[in-house]
Image (cartoon, rainbow, N blue to C red):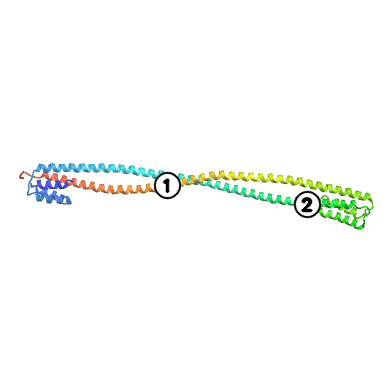
Amino acid sequence: MKTVLLITLIAIAFTARVQEKNLAKITTDLKKSTYGNALLHLVELHSMVGGPVQELVDAIEELINDLEEELEELEFNFQQRTNEHNSLVIGYEQDIQDAVIDVNNTQDTLDNLLFPRREQLQVRIEQIQEYQEANRQNYEEAVLTREQEHEDFEFQVAELNDATAAVDDALALLSSLTNPSLLQIKRFQNSLKNIESKIKSRSKMAPMIKALITLASNQNFSDQGIIGQIVDALNEFRNAIVDSINAQTAAEADAQADHEEYLEQLDAEFAEFQRQINRINVDLTATNEKIDQMSDFRDQREADRKQYVAELELENNTYAEETDIYTNLKNEFTRELGISEQALSVVKSADFTNIQV
């Protein structure tokens, strides 16, 4: 500011008298501001001193030029700042828009792709695990059923072996019956009943043993022909028992082989189910990692958006404050420029012919 210099130069040079009418008007105008009022006091004080008028005019003109340059520089700097502000606002608004797009697109991908994908994988794993549970249940049931079947087989074979032994006992008794006593006959009949007790009523051989019992109950075994027929029947019956044992043993072997093959099939199915679960778990792990990554990215972009909004608000507030400062400075420069021009007009229009230079 060269205001003080202006005041000093005017105070030194302003010693001439002006026409009363013009001086009164200019004095009234200058008194409207503190700066002009101070100028008048200094001019009044210096009116008694005298000084070179042209020097005062040059100084005022230089000061006016300086004020105009400062005002121009102020305008230029503010325009630069305005351009910078507009560029920053555009940049922040673009950053905010980009962040919003990223957040929305990422959330859309999570909601419509990754979250449903994860749910599908989890549901698929649960389904396969249910298959595994059913597989193990079938396995356990098959084992229990096979154990029961084997126990039944062993029990039936034991009965048939007992029946075979009973037949052998009956044949041995028949071979000793030449002149059988009543007691021997009774023992043979009891032996046949023992055979019957070893044979289940549902067995195919049950009718045969009943027929033998009926035949033996009506005989005194004195007729060797009858005894021979009974022996033949018993041998035929014994052969039937042996055939039955052999058939059941073969069926048991086949059942055991089928059972083991079935268990192997169940184990293979269970292993395949586990392989499927393992593959899905790999996919599920990758999906969860992708979800975590995109969630982190979404959260980061949301944080970026908030940061950009805060920076935009700060920039707008700062620019508003700088605009106020610019406006105040411009008004101050304009006011001082007007006062300086008034002062120059006073100096140039006054009558300084009687002033000693």
Instruction: Kindly tell me whether residue 348 is visible in this rendering.
Output: no
Image position of 19 (left or right of 310): left
User: Which kind of residue does numbered mark 2 sit on?
Assistant: Ala
Q: Nearer the viewer, residue 292 or 256?
A: 256
Question: Judging from the image, what secondary structure is the residue with disc 2 in?
Answer: helix
Label 1, on which residue?
300
User: Which kind of residue does numbered mark 1 sit on?
Assistant: Gln
Percent of width and height locating residue 288: 50, 46
| Residue at x 17% of width, y 52% of height | 34
Distance from Cα at disc 2 to Cα at disc 1: 80 Å
Label 2, on which residue?
158
| Residue at x 37% of width, y 44% of height | 93
Q: Residues within 10 Å of mark 2 (few under 14, many from 20)?
A: some
Q: Quadrant of residue 189?
A: bottom right
| Residue at x 12% of width, y 47% of height | 8
Q: Nearer the viewer, residue 67 or 273?
A: 273
Q: Quadrant of the C terminus?
A: top left
Percent of width and height locating residue 316: 32, 47
